[in-house]
Image (tube, rainbow, N blue to C red):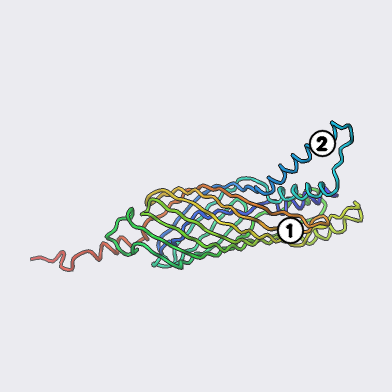
Amino acid sequence: MRTALLLALLLSTGCASTLSTLQTAKPLARGQVRVSGATGLFVPAGQLGSLISQGISEGRAIRDAVSSGRPYHLDEREAQRLLGVGVALAVAPPGPSNELMIRTGLLASHGLDVGLRLSTTSLRFDAKARLAHGGDAEDDDSLPDYRRKSYDIALGAAVARHLFKSPVLDALEIVQINDFSRWDLEVPLYLSVDVGDVFKLYGAPKYIYSRTSLDSKLVDYSRGGQDVSGFDLGLPARVSNHFMGASVGVALGFRYVHLYAELTGGYSHCRPVLFGQARDLGGVTLYPAVGIALQNPRPWGARARRSASEVPENQGIGL
C-alpha cells in the first residue's frame, strides 16, 4: 500500500521544468523566423548536496556504532529527513531534457515576437516585448550585419502545460488516474548585447510558478490508507513550486546559424505536506544547456523592397 502510493506520487510529479532561455532580448522582426534545438541537464544541486551530507553523517554513525560494539539505530528525525530528500529527488530527478522551439516576429520594428517550445516534458508558449533599445539604427542599410550593434531590454511572459501522466496505478489495477495536470507560469526579464551578427551576450532573471494538481481519486485513496497501514499516507490535492533565478548565456555564429551555451541557476521553494509532514522538495537548482538556432537574418521581402527603392527613377528610359 505504502509503496504503491509512493510510486503514484513519484510518477505523477517526477518531472522537472525545462529552465533554459536560449534567446536574447532583441525580438525578431515581422518576416523573421527562428528554429532552434537544444539539450539541457536538470541538476537539483541543493538536494544532491543534502543527500551526500546526510549519507556521510550516517556512514560515520554506522562506523562508530560498529567500532563500539553497539547496534546502529536511525532515529525518527533523521529517517524523516532522509525520506524528504529521497522524495525531492524522485519528484525532480537529475536528468537531460531536449527541446525544439520556433519563433517569429509580429512587428517590423523588432518590438514583439512569440515562440512555441516543445520539450521532453512540456509545451510552452511565450511572448517577448522590447522595453528599451540602444546601438545602431536597425533601418540603416549602410552598415553590414557584422558591424551592427544592439543593446536591448525586453519583458517576457510564458505559460507551459506539462505533457505527462501517471499510468502506475492503472498498471497495478489499484485506482484509475484521470485528472492530473501541471502548469507553469514564467516571467523573464531579458537583457542582451548583440555585437554585429557574430557574438551575443545575454542574461534573463526569471520567476516561474508551477502548480501540480493530483487526481482526486488518488488523494482520497491516500487519505484512507491510514486505516489499512497504520501510517499517514496523505497526499496533497495541489503542489505549488516557486523558482527564482537567472540564465546567463552566449551565442556565436553569423547570419543563418548560431550556437548557444548558457547556465541557469536559482532556488526552488516547494514545501507540500506529504505523509503527514511538510517536506522540503526545493533547493538550489542548476540547468546548463546548449543549442543551435537557424534563422533568416533579414525579414522575408525586405531585401526585395530595398532593392526596388534603390533603382533610379529614370532607369530604363532612353532614346
The secondary structure type at the circle numbered 1 is loop
**What numbered label is drawn on residue 271?**
1
Q: Residues within 10 Å of mark 2 (few under 14, many from 20)?
A: some
The mark lying in front, picked from 2 and 1, is 2
Q: Quadrant of the C terminus?
A: bottom left
Front residue (pair 217, 45): 45
Front residue (pair 4, 17): 17
Q: Position of residue 109 (x, y in %)?
A: 39, 67
Front residue (pair 16, 64): 64
Front residue (pair 267, 8): 267
**What numbered label is drawn on residue 100?**
none
Q: Position of residue 15 (x, y in %)?
A: 67, 51
**What numbered label is drawn on residue 62?**
2
The secondary structure type at the circle numbered 2 is helix
Which residue does the image show at 61% across and 59% down from the upper left? 244
On screen, residue 50 versus residue 306, left or right, reads right
